[in-house]
Image: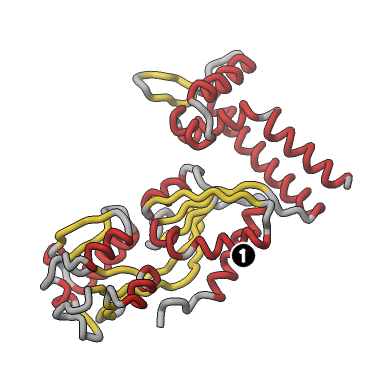
Amino acid sequence: CYKKILLEYFLWGYHMADRRLQVFHTVARLLSFTKAAESLHMTQPAVTFQVRQLEDYFNTRLFDRTHNRISLTDAGAHVYEYAAKIFELYSEMENSVRAMTGEISGSLTIGASTTIAEYMLPALLGDFKVKYPDVNIHLKVSNTEGIVSMVENNAIDLGVVEAPVANKNLVVEICKADQLVAIVPPGHPEAGRTTLTYEDLIKYPFICREEGSGTREVINEYLAQIKDNVDDLNISMELGSPEAVKGAVEAGMGISVVSRATIQKELKLNTLVAINLEPSLERPFSFVHQKQKFRARVMEELLEFAQKYCEEHKNDCID
């Protein structure tokens, strides 16, 4: 009992006594009061008030504000450096105390690219919530480029993406392989084929995801390896979600290449036909997060749970 009381006291101190420092650290990291307010789920005036309170406490400016842009003063940079160390120690302390109590609770913010958020995460997070009902999970959906940016800016704890991550300062852990296939409506001239090549794809209007999408990026890289000039692809539409792409193909507006995991319902209903690509195309679904020496216990549990889940379902929708 005393261990739980100790944990609650520490967490109360973290959220109450150091709220100004937490707000300042977020503003300094993002160099934006607006973005910090969004990240902290606060109003911008409330963020500004907390920062001014900290400036009053130190009796010095922590930010230079010029032409709608902000930058850290020398004093601000000093406070930011110490704040990072303080929060790392808090994280270490929280992990240590939670290990003593065995408690798994708290909040996590996960970001996922559209395909993963719609077709993979609901089952994974549902199973996780059953095992850890006291954990609150918030999900943000964007394309792969947006999710990586959120991880870089610490706006989310964990990202799950469907394309390679270029930032070598982030930790990337492969979850499972995802097979991409061409899709056409029943009755299409190519519907009876078992495979399609690059030359087959360029014969027809092509429907693809928007720039920044992991699926779009993977397809571009795949085609570039086969043919130096991918401009031969006759792109007729760019759409913002897998559902929109599937709907356009079903309506006979063109062909596309999508994750096999996204078309299970359409294959059963016979509204779409899947055709393997030649050469074949697979990509990894990957977890991406910051390199941190100490992470909250709940984050460690989610990573371990997700990796085990992916191992158990690694062959789903590939055969």
Spot occupied by residue 28 in the image (x, y as percentages of width and height): 50, 31
* Residue at image location 49% in from the left, 43% down from the top: 155
Location of residue 7 by image quarter:
top right
What secondary structure is marked by label 1?
Answer: helix
Q: How is the structure coloured here?
A: secondary structure
In this rendering, the answer to whether 247 lies above or below 26 is below
Image: 221 above or below 269 = above
The residue beneath circle 1 is 305
Q: How many marks?
A: 1
Q: Nearer the viewer, residue 49 or 118?
A: 118
The C terminus sits in image quarter: bottom left
Q: In the image, is residue 145 above or below residue 155?
A: below
**Residue 260 location in percent, x, y?**
36, 73
- Residue placed at 31% from the left, 53% from the top? 212
Residue 64 in percent (x, y) is at 45, 20
Quarter location, residue 163: bottom left
Q: Amino acid at mark 1?
A: Phe
Residue at the location (62% across, 49% down)? 136
Looking at the image, residue 210 sits to the left or right of residue 66; the answer is left
Residue 76 lies, in percent from the top left, at 54, 25
Q: Is residue 23 left or right of residue 143?
A: right
Residue found at the far front of this picture: 269
The image quarter in which residue 181 lies: bottom left
From this viewpoint, is residue 294 visible? no
Residue 167 seen in this snapshot: yes
Q: Give the residue at x 62% y 47%.
A: 107
